[in-house]
Amino acid sequence: MNKIYLVCTRAAMSGSALAYIINQSPDFYNTLHNNVWEEENNDSFGTAYTINDWWNLNDDIANKLQYDVIFRNTQQLTKTQLINLCKGFNDLSLDKNLCLFSHARNIKEIKNHINNYNLPIVIVSTVFGEKCGTFINSWIKREYSNEMNKFIDLFDSWEYIFTQRISNDEEWKKHSDYAFGMHDWLIDTNKIYDSLNIKPYNDIHQWTKQYLDKNNSNAARFKDTSQKLSTLLSLFDLLQSNYKQGHEKVLLCYNLFELIHTHKKHDLETLVDSYHKTY
């Protein structure tokens, strides 16, 4: 039985790239295309390149699925939306699976509707996850694009990110069928195909490299911000296993912020050694 794989994600996490990667599997419906890339202006960090979520959906398919901007952007998908989506999917008889992108956050409720109405939907959620500091450039260009949020300062961004890592990531994992970190789909991409038990697209790494190259920030005046956020996240990855409770990890994050502002050298070995001596 063919299914809809619904990628539910927070904004600015390259979740549309995950949906694109899944749709490249030979088990999924996709088409020849030349309209994948969309641009988001960012006066501070440089242009962000995102994915056109309708690249493989012509108007007829989108209309039958009732997949529109409202469906894509809502944080609360309803029973009616999900039932209509699946009815349209069955009527289309694509003979393939299909992956769609959504900002829906009510994953527990979506899961209940799937179970209660036997809907052919697989929920795939996204988390920042370990090694997400590798992708801080792509995140920062999207998070602080002209149409999203205003950049305040390094501390404000760090508080937001470590809250995602410590608390929100766990919530996004709870009720989904699969949860993937940014490193999974942007670097260890075959893990996605293996975990979902779908056929891989063998040349996908060429595309992920292109995606990361296009979203590498070239804004020199904010380079220090990106580097420090990346360093903070790497330090968190190295040290967080020493702390079990959420409040302990929060304190760790504040201490790490203090640490990088009291040391001129920001190589990880020096900072980890200094952390153990100081805290």
Image (cartoon, helix red, strand yellow):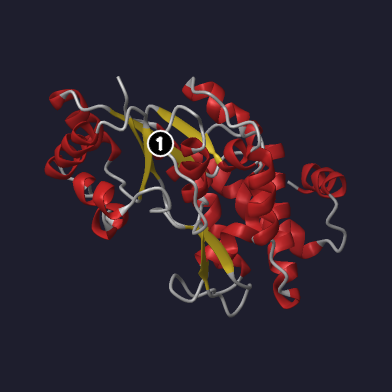
Amino acid on which the number 1 mark rests in the picture: Tyr
Q: Quadrant of the N terminus?
A: top left
Q: Tell me residue 228's x, y (percent).
A: 72, 61
Residue 233 appears in the rendering: no
Residue at 51 percent of width and 35 percent of height: 180
Task: Looking at the picture, tell me which residue is in the foreground, 257 or 26.
Answer: 26
Image position of 25 with respect to 279: above or below = above
Task: Looking at the picture, tell me which residue is in the foreground, 211 or 110.
Answer: 211
Q: Tell me residue 110's x, y (percent).
A: 23, 36
Image position of 258 with respect to 253: above or below = below
Residue at 20 percent of width and 24 percent of height: 115
Residue at 45 percent of width and 27 percent of height: 27
Circle 1 Cα neighbour tier, 10 Å, few/some/many (<14 / 14–19 / ≥20) = some
Residue 70 appears in the rendering: yes
Q: Tell me residue 62's x, y (percent).
A: 27, 50
Q: Is residue 68 left or right of residue 216?
A: left
Task: Looking at the picture, tell me which residue is in the foreground, 229 or 201.
Answer: 201
Q: Is residue 26 left or right of residue 76?
A: right
Residue at 22 percent of width and 44 percent of height: 65
Q: Tell me residue 44's x, y (percent).
A: 61, 77
Q: Considering the numbered disc 1 on the image, is that residue within a helix, a strand or a loop?
A: loop
Q: Which residue is mark 1?
A: 29
Residue, far front: 32
